[in-house]
Amino acid sequence: MMSQDRKLTRIGDVCKTNQQTYSVSEKWPFVNYLDTGNITKNRVSEIQHLVTGQDTLPSRARRKVTVDDILYSTVRPNQRHYGIVKEVLPNMLVSTGFVVITVDKAVADSDFLYYYLTQNDIVDGLHAIGEQSVSAYPSIKPSDIESLEMMLPPLEEQREIGHILRVLDDKIANNTAINHHLEQMAQAIFKSWFVSFEPFGGVMPNDWREVKFSTFLTPRIEKSNDPKIPLFSVTDTGIYPRDEKFKKKLSKAETKNKIARETDLVFGMSREILNWGVMRSTIGGVSSAYNVFAVDSRINSKYLESFIKAHSFYFKDLIRPATREGQGIDKTALMLKSIYLPPDEVLAEYYAIEDAMMAQIREKEAESNCLAEIRDALLPRLMSGELSVADMDAK
């Protein structure tokens, strides 16, 4: 049952937007800058450290923030470039592409309002407003958020709801941090064994073989326009589905996608950056701009992936100059490159260590997925009042 104490409230009545602006006359010696593209669903990928007089400060680096400020990108809300500030770095600025929402804590809870604004129907509604804008791309104004109305529960109930959802997100964030640390450890061990050769006296043992990529790579030319096949994107850390929950139907422009199968190696260009990955799904479509190679079963695909990651500098000369057909990679040059292969017993010893780390990573990922499902199920019910904190305590 919805709490009888909830009151219809305009969001603009419990917060203010874009309160503090930086002026270059303040002459900060450095700036820690967060751009809109560097935060998604409250996960920050990068904060740029810019030194005055040495680095160029972006013209959009103007918004000051305080703890518990909510950041909400004004461009394409459905891309979910939003978050809530829990730590303010020295001289921190964020892009003017954000609406910076400062909550009046005497009447509202910042976490509660943050989770309210991240609900699917709210995001979709703001994106629909953005699509009516006169700009070249969907964009909203601070007033579009301020004018939203909600049934606001008493402050203490807001805090309890915000706390419940925050605990779930904090646990997910902690799992992500642990997995990142484990991945870094695995990469460090790989480089120690197979780049620096530390367990082998610092030199590559004589019984390791050096072979050309052409000995175990075969260009795959399969293509498909089957809408049941998910479309994958390539990043510098591997291949992942664009949408993990819904298999994306291929558009007319994508009917010539190449097929990549499990353990296939994919190389290509994206925004003048060499991207690659080893396919981790049974089957998927990748853009025709990428080159797909079937990997011979006689080589360990995990070792191949780790080798490329550890020797990324070795592959930079594969970039083919831009042509009318676009950029790509030099397939001939790739096939001429070499890789050194350790004996099977050395790989087995290494992967006994790495597999234990990967098992921990998969366990944390599974736990995080479960927690995210719980959060997503609770969020709309708690916000609407269909489920109360008292109901949860009773259960």
Image (cartoon, rainbow, N blue to C red):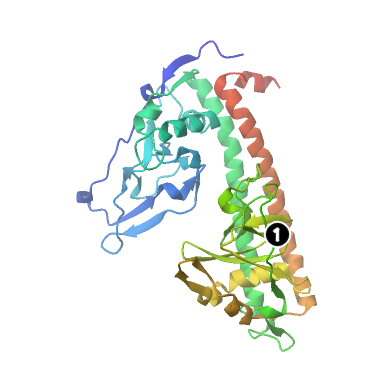
Q: Amino acid at mark 1?
A: Met
Q: Residue at horizontal 62%, vertical 82%? A: 336
Displayed quadrant of residue 11? top left
Depth order, front residue of 204/135 = 135
Q: Which percent across, then down, holds residue 375? A: 62, 33
Q: Is residue 340 above or below residue 154?
A: below
Q: Residue furthest top?
A: 4
Q: Which percent across, then down, holds residue 315? A: 55, 75
The residue tagged with tag 1: helix, strand or loop? helix
Q: Which percent across, then down, holds residue 278? A: 66, 63
Q: Which percent across, then down, holds residue 233? A: 59, 55
Tell me if 308 is positioned left or right of 30 in this view.
right
Q: Residues within 10 Å of mark 1 (few under 14, many from 20)?
A: some
Displayed quadrant of residue 345? bottom right
Depth order, front residue of 292/182 = 292
Quarter of the figure with the C terminus: top right
Using the rendered image of the protein, determine whether residue 386 is visible from the camera's viewpoint: yes
Q: Residue furthest left?
A: 25
- Total numbered circles: 1
Q: Residue at horizontal 60%, vertical 69%? A: 309
Q: Residue furthest bottom?
A: 206
**Label 1, on which residue?**
357
Quarter of the figure with the N terminus: top right
Displayed quadrant of residue 258? bottom right
Q: Is residue 25 above or below residue 162?
A: below
Q: Residue at horizontal 40%, vertical 45%? A: 88
Using the rendered image of the protein, determine whether residue 16 is visible from the camera's viewpoint: no
